[in-house]
Amino acid sequence: MPSIIEKMQSELALKEIFEQATEYAFKYINNIGDQDPFPSPKAIAQLSHFKESLPTEGIESTEILELLHTYGSPATTAQTGGRYFGFVTGGAIPVALASKWLTDVWDQNSGLYLMSPVASTIEAVTETWLREIFDLNQSVVASFLSGTSMAIVCGLAAARYRIFKRANWNFNRKGHIGGPAIRIVAGDTAHGAVIKAVSLLGFGIDNIEWVDTDDQGRLMLDQFPKLDDTTIVLLQAGNVNTGSFDPIQEVCKRANEVGAWVHIDGAFGLWAAASSNLKHLTRGMEKAQSWSVDGHKTLNTPYDNGILLCADKEALHGALQSSGSYLAYSNQRDGMLYTPEMSKRARAIELWATLKSLGKQGVDELVTGLHMRAMQFAEQLRASNFQILNEVVFNQILVGFEHNDNYTQKIVEHIQLSGDCWVGTSTWQGKLVIRISICSWATTSDDVNRSVAAFVNARDSLTA
Ligand SMILES: *Cc1c(COP(=O)(O)O)cnc(C)c1O
């Protein structure tokens, strides 16, 4: 029996498992157009192959990859194909995936410049590109995080640091108790990740001053409370049901006048700013203090790609500071000053590769394209007498029915089983609705035609 060191040395030398992984990956890519958007019952049943207790002895690595290929791959949702519209997910730009493969081999830790000059340099460059694409001030800095959920946590932590500091209160040392009260203002359709951040940071969900929203989920200005410099306002660029945008410009104006902090959650919707046709939706966004946005949704980078943009670098670093006798900060970018994690992979590289591959024009085309396919989807559904509940301003479509929720559920199940496309449900204004999210670059006009036909078939078969 070889030792584990000998086993691994020989695997690296032979490269067989890497070639095997590549071969499986290419098979997956080649079939993705034909794969059902959601795994079959058989594929799901076969996941039983993974359910075992921890082995005492390891097995051949080739068998591990074979297991993943044989039973893992068929049980994936075909998110990188063109007919998966469940949740707000996003596909994967090929060069972003390829860059991820290559840089996985590098296995860099992007915590400090000293740990990875290349990761630090590419993070710094990507930060300047993001400022440019979102048209933000030179003082804005970027944190590269696991997703928007963490980006919101960090944005709110920076806001809190700043508000307490203004009141001469060292939050990191003293915490909340005895300090100034912070007010949180949010629309009543705020995303679950925003609410999670509020509770995780100890602000308390019951302390949120909720603002009523209109029939598209946009916060209503006539209901808006008076702000002050202890307030954090949480705005939405892209409602997760309707895709709608809060009145960003007017709220930022009111907040700026009194020194309130505005955080804009634009997990998927902030990218509207990068589309010449849709830019109007985010008008005034540059006047906020922090923004959360995902690479892994609208921009189609692979997962684990969230971004916080923050106009107050001192507050961000203040909130996330850490110390240790061995830490050696540099005069270059040290990634860990921008994130809660210390060790973290160099995730900004996929983002950089995506932006470099698309360019400013390509990003515009990508984002505009998702909107056009959403418009096509909605128009064709309307032409077939389906009821579209929202103004399709971005990539989200809500389909409603006169019948009860049970009927809606049956239609959805029929569509899901068809294998033509996969859509999910949501609750909108008290009723079950079908929610369609166009998030993948891979969705073509033909994919939309086929998906609309699946809606029509589902309705016909229920009528019959
Ligand atoms: C997806 C989403 C989030 C959470 O982002 P993750 O990347 O999944 O952590 C927050 N807000 C909105 C509007 C979203 O769509």
Image: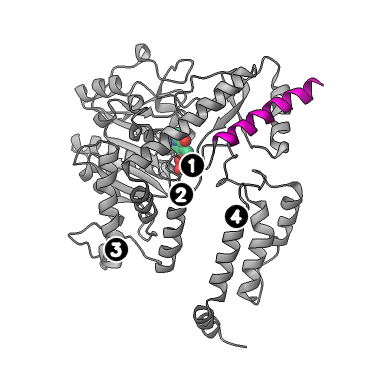
Assign a secondary structure to mark 4: helix
- 3 and 1 marks in contact (CB < 8 Å): no
**Amino acid found under the numbered disc labelled 3:** Val
Q: Residue furthest bottom?
A: 1
Ranked by sequence position, the earlier of labels 4 and 1 is 4
**Amino acid found under the numbered disc labelled 4:** Asn
Q: Return the mark for residue 441.
A: 1
Assign a secondary structure to mark 1: loop
Ranked by sequence position, the earlier of labels 2 and 4 is 4
Which residue is denoted by mark 3 in the rendering? 118
Which residue is denoted by mark 4 in the rendering? 30
Q: Residue furthest right?
A: 464
Residue visible at 73% across and 58% down in the picture: 48
Which residue is denoted by mark 2 in the rendering? 93
Residue visible at 43% across and 53% down in the picture: 96
Q: Residue 98: horizontal and vertical position, in percent?
A: 45, 59
C-alpha distance separating marks 3 and 1: 29 Å
Q: Is residue 430 shown left or right of residue 374?
A: right
